[in-house]
Amino acid sequence: MGASVEGRSYLLVGGTSGMGLAAAEALSAQGANVALVGRSRERAEAAADALRAKHGVKAVTVQGDAAASQAEANRFVGEAVAALGRVDGMAVTTGTDIEHSRKPLDTMTDGDWAADFEDLLMGTVRPCMAVIPYLVEQGSGAIVTTAAYSVHAPDRSAVPYSTFKAAVALFTKGLARTYGSHGVQANCVCPGAVETDKLHQLRSHFAKEKGVPFEEALERVMIEDWELVIAMRRPGQPAEVGELIAFLLSQRSGYLTGALINIDGGTNF
């Protein structure tokens, strides 16, 4: 990646943990400056401090909630751009694990659907629409959004989640078609089961519950209990998704736009 991101600046919405933080780590390791946006200022500042200390890059933080309103998204994107001096790309990795979106359809209320719409869909739409004017004005830039492998095969217990993630995928293609002539790329990644903090905590729980080795517990549950057919027979790691996001934000992905890219270890082909 090297020179394709070195000295450039990127905004990571949801960049304080999980796949977003992993993308910030991958970019910073190659000399890019980053702005981390998250709901927790303390977590964002801790992450930014670590990136600065480790890689010697500019890492700034902005507290914000992408699901709140367009005005809120405009504010935190504007603050991030001002702090960095410019923005060469943005990734949105929020809305990836919402409890009430992973419920059977017959238990969903209107309130659940409304909350999922705001968090899973509009939480991506709003920061994208906030950053577009900056990218169009400079005539270049990249956007990466996050859907899920289940947009291809929704689980019965998570149809609402898959529904709005499918909307994110289509929205991203719309961005690519609408703003490609302005030099703006937009691509969408579709992760499978990724061992972020919450899933990693379940590994310990399953090891104790089932009396199996820690390093095998999650893999066994995914295959035997959750019935996930994964070719690689393991969950993904945040760093693996982060590297893909960093590539899509870099200049090395120059002619790639409107793509829907699975990173799921070969789940349910």
Image (cartoon, rainbow, N blue to C red):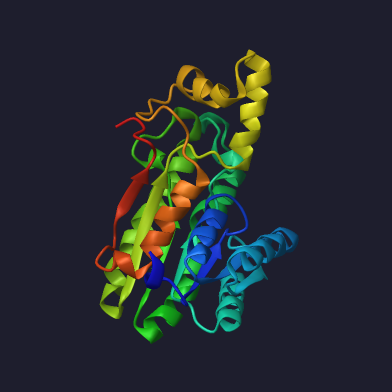
Residue 248 appears left or right of 64: left
Tell me the residue at 30%/77% (across/down): 183
- In the displayed structure, would residue 85 be above or below residue 109? below
Image coords of residue 222 (percent x, y)? 49, 25
- Nearer the observer, 106 or 101: 101
Image coords of residue 107 (percent x, y)? 57, 31
Quadrant into which the C terminus falls: top left
What is the count of numbered marks? 0
Return the residue found at the far top.
Answer: 211
- Nearer the observer, 116 or 197: 197
- In the displayed structure, would residue 213 be above or below residue 257? above
- Nearer the observer, 130 or 23: 23
- Nearer the observer, 130 or 31: 31
Image coords of residue 71 (percent x, y)? 59, 74
Image coords of residue 23 (percent x, y)? 50, 58
Say whether residue 140 is visible. Answer: yes
Tell me the residue at 31%/60% (across/down): 173
Tell me the residue at 58%/43% (across/down): 98
**In which quarter of the view is residue 108 placed?**
top right
